[in-house]
Image (spheres, grey):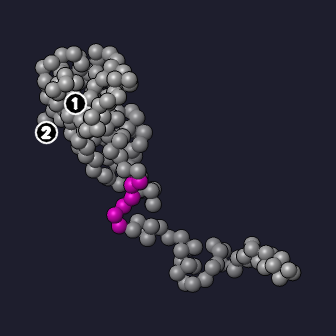
Amino acid sequence: MEDTLIPDYVDARKIFAQQALIKGIIPVSRLSRFCELVAATQGDVQVTMKFDLDESNRRIIEGELDTQAQVLCQRCLEPMEITLHDEFRLAVVSSESKSEGLPKSLDPWICEDIKLVVAEVIEEQLILCMPIVSYHDHDCIEKLSFEATEAKENGTAKAANGANKPNPFDILKTLKDKD
């Protein structure tokens, strides 16, 4: 893929009429909402976007993006790298009401202005392809040592200080026995 920077915005009237193809990169640091979801903001997103008109004269963006992102493992809270890849088809419409009746193969992208901000499109697609939960493939919890885990493995229910902890529900047994 080329190392050309993706433009900040394009003229929505011209780019579809020209049936343009944009290939290049956008730095992750330019995507502020996406940066809030990741552990590190280094790196670039490789992007390919084709702007076209379909048979119904709808403005269509077909695109693909790839990047490596640093996120926190939900088990051990250590950083880990994930690969994000997405292919998308968007219909650019001027209002939400015009998005009704679009084919199911197209997702709407509302652009009320002639200025189409390319970074917003890319950022939204990145956020949508993020996994809900990220964790290491290997069992990263084994690296962490907890006394409670060791006690469970020994078959005892000891507290962290080593003494037997009274069961708070023992009082309920006495109430049941009175009946």
Q: At x 73% / y 77%, what residue is drawn?
A: 166
Identify the image quadrant of residue 179.
bottom right
Residue type at mark 2: give it: Met
* 123 inside magenta stretch: no
Is residue 40 shown to the viewer in this render? no
Q: Which mark is first along the chain, 1 or 2?
A: 2
Magenta stretch: dominant secondary structure: loop
- Of the two numbered discs 2 and 1 in the rendering, the one whose residue sits closer to the viewer: 1
4 left or right of 97 in image: left
Q: At x 65% / y 74%, what residue is drawn?
A: 159
Q: Is disc 2 surrounded by few (<14), some (14 to 19) or many (20+) residues within 10 Å?
A: few
On the image, the x and y values in percent for residue 57 come to 19, 22
Residue type at mark 1: give it: Ile
On the image, the x and y values in percent for residue 113 come to 32, 16
**Mark 1, residue position:** 61
Q: Nearer the viewer, residue 50 or 159?
A: 50
Secondary structure type for disc 1: strand
**Mark 2, residue position:** 1
Is residue 62 shown to the viewer in this render? yes
Q: Residue furthest front?
A: 101
**Range shown magenta:** 133-138
Q: Is disc 1 surrounded by few (<14), some (14 to 19) or many (20+) residues within 10 Å?
A: many
